[in-house]
Amino acid sequence: CSGPIPLFRVLNPYSFSYNFSLIFVFAILILLFAIEQRFSFSSVLFFGLFVFVAVGSKVSNAAGIAIGLISIFVSALIHRKGIRKAFLLGCSAALAVAMFWLFAYRVPGVTGGSTIRLDFGEIFIQKANYSWSSIMPVLIFGFIATFAMTIYPLSGFLLQRSVSSKARSVASIFALGTGFSFIFLSVLLADDLESSSYLLGAGLAVLTPISLRNLFSSATKIPPLRPLVTFIAISLGLMSAFAWYRFYSDLGKNQTSNQITQSLILSIPIFVAL
């Protein structure tokens, strides 16, 4: 929940509603995996209930869930399979959002506390300790390093072809559409309350389990490595994470020289992995 860079917080200590919403986002994913094995009317009802709570606890979840469901429906149309399932899930989610909008969100006398605006890259300024006053090369290098480190946990999607039989599952398609839309919107949109970090966190929360599944599925096809090699690889990963945290915590903020050093420090785990 804490760290020198707020952008990389898995849970947000300042938003209980965001942390609570992740429970039901994961519940949606687990339910969709179960639906692959057995589809029933009760599963549709539970899906609508989970969507209602996920959107009710954090309204920004609605955009990602909508894009995830659209992805499922488009995939069903392309492959001419599971159209009825996609349609029922979409209707259940739409009914849940409509009920939330009518009976919970539109409360008389309650207004929003911030206005969302198009502001590309503002999340790196708000949450990654960069500054618009820095020279352009420093900003560009910093944005690239920060974004690369942010999506580094998603490297398992590079192995998507090796698990192609699972890639077309309803849960996987939903996770891809929802997760990447969250990440895209977090970089594109901003507000004064710095809420775009919730979008980024939700996107990574949805995509990282699928990425790990791809990694473990691919690892089962590789001959077992010697224990010493595995131990060295794990040790290097832990050491790079410790060095990343220790080096960065000694830096100041919003200074050009420190921003360049920060960008290099952020790249340590990626260099070690390569």
Image (cartoon, helix red, strand yellow):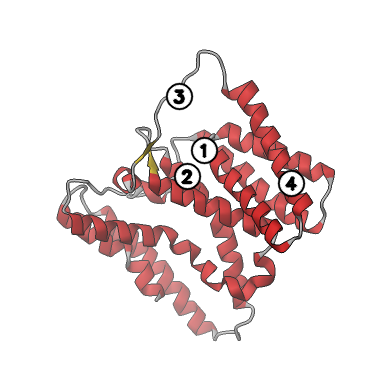
Going from N to C along the chain, the mark reached first, 1 or 2, is 1
Point out the frontmost of discs 4 and 2: 4
In the displayed structure, 136 sits above or below 115; it is: below
Label 2, secondary structure: give it. Answer: helix
Q: Nearer the viewer, residue 22 or 187?
A: 187
Q: Quadrant of residue 151?
A: bottom left
Whole-Å distance between the Cαs marked 2 and 3? 17 Å
Q: Which mark is residue 87?
A: 4
Label 3, secondary structure: give it. Answer: loop
Going from N to C along the chain, the mark reached first, 3 or 4, is 4
Q: Nearer the viewer, residue 137 or 197?
A: 137
Whole-Å distance between the Cαs marked 1 and 2? 7 Å
Going from N to C along the chain, the mark reached first, 2 or 3, is 3
Label 4 near label 1: C-beta < 8 Å?
no
Bin the neighbour count of mark 2 within 10 Å (Cα to Cα): few under 14, some 14-19, many 20 and up. many
Whole-Å distance between the Cαs marked 4 and 2? 26 Å
Name the residue that disc number 1 marks: 60
* Residue at image point 55% right, 13% down: 108
Name the residue that disc number 3 marks: 112
Whole-Å distance between the Cαs marked 1 and 3? 13 Å
